[in-house]
Image (cartoon, rainbow, N blue to C red):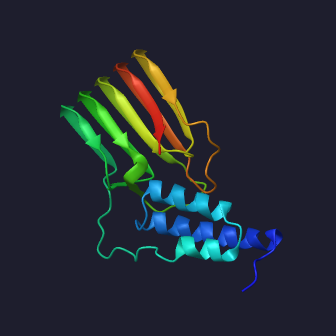
């Protein structure tokens, strides 16, 4: 097999990216696995390297449950790490406690590639921490009466096909920290 010319690789890269987007939407890849693989697709020098990224995709999960739309904690912290399900639109409600969402292992509900992941957090007293894979863009909005905001994302370009995370925090007293980690 001969190496494809750079112009011939563009459609193959787009096709591979779409297959990876489908896999993350079906819950076969986490967001971190997706960003890693799609980065390798766009860095590939030939079609063989592109196919190598796709060869070991997990098979679809049978009987998977749908993630909850609302996460609630009245007195206490709410933490999601490792492999967990995340809907494209999620609301977090806290009365007194912190929320720590690590999206690196999140399996995101299937949706259009350009559809953002929207997380709305409402808390009376508590901090919000969000961790995303490197190359995932985060838009921060909302309002906090008494609290600091710290956004510390890696200085890397957005990974092609990675969803944008739109985080909106509504809080009376609490800090917000957004960071990326490899």
Q: Which of the image's four quarters has the N terminus?
A: bottom right
Residue 25 placement (x, y as % from top left): 47, 64
Q: Is residue 176 left or right of residue 92?
A: right
Q: Is residue 20 left or right of residue 48?
A: left
Please give the name of the residue rendered at 75% of the width and 68% of the height, measured from the top-left corner: 10
Please give the name of the residue rendered at 27% of the width and 31% of the height, measured from the top-left corner: 94
Residue 20 placement (x, y as % from top left): 54, 67
How many numbered circles are shown? 0
130 to 20, vertically: above or below:
above
- Give 65 or 14, whichever is nearer the viewer: 14
Residue 92 placement (x, y as % from top left): 33, 39
- Give 19 or 74, whichever is nearer the viewer: 19
Please give the name of the residue rendered at 64% of the width and 55% of the height, measured from the top-left corner: 160
Please give the name of the residue rendered at 54% of the width and 49% of the height, measured from the top-left corner: 116
Residue 117 placement (x, y as % from top left): 49, 48
40 to 90, vertically: above or below:
below
Q: Residue furthest top?
A: 146
Q: Residue furthest left?
A: 75
150 to 63, vertically: above or below:
above
């Amino acid at each position: 097999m001969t190496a494809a010319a750079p112009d011939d690789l563009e459609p193959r890269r787009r096709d591979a990216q779409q297959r990876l987007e489908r896999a993350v939407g079906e819950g076969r890849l986490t967001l971190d696995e997706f960003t890693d693989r799609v980065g390798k697709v766009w860095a590939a020098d030939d079609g063989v390297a592109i196919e190598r990224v796709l060869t070991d995709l997990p098979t679809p999960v049978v009987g998977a449950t749908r993630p909850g739309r609302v996460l609630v904690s009245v007195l206490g912290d709410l933490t999601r790490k490792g492999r967990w399900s995340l809907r494209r639109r999620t609301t977090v409600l806290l009365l007194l406690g912190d929320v720590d969402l690590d999206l690196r292992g999140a399996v995101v509900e299937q949706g259009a590639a350009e559809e953002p992941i929207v997380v709305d957090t409402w808390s009376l007293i508590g901090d919000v921490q969000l961790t995303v894979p490197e190359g995932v863009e985060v838009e921060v909005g909302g309002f906090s009466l008494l609290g600091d905001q710290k956004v510390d994302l890696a200085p890397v370009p957005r990974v092609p096909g990675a969803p944008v995370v739109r985080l909106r925090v509504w809080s009376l007293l609490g800090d917000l920290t957004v960071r990326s980690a490899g």
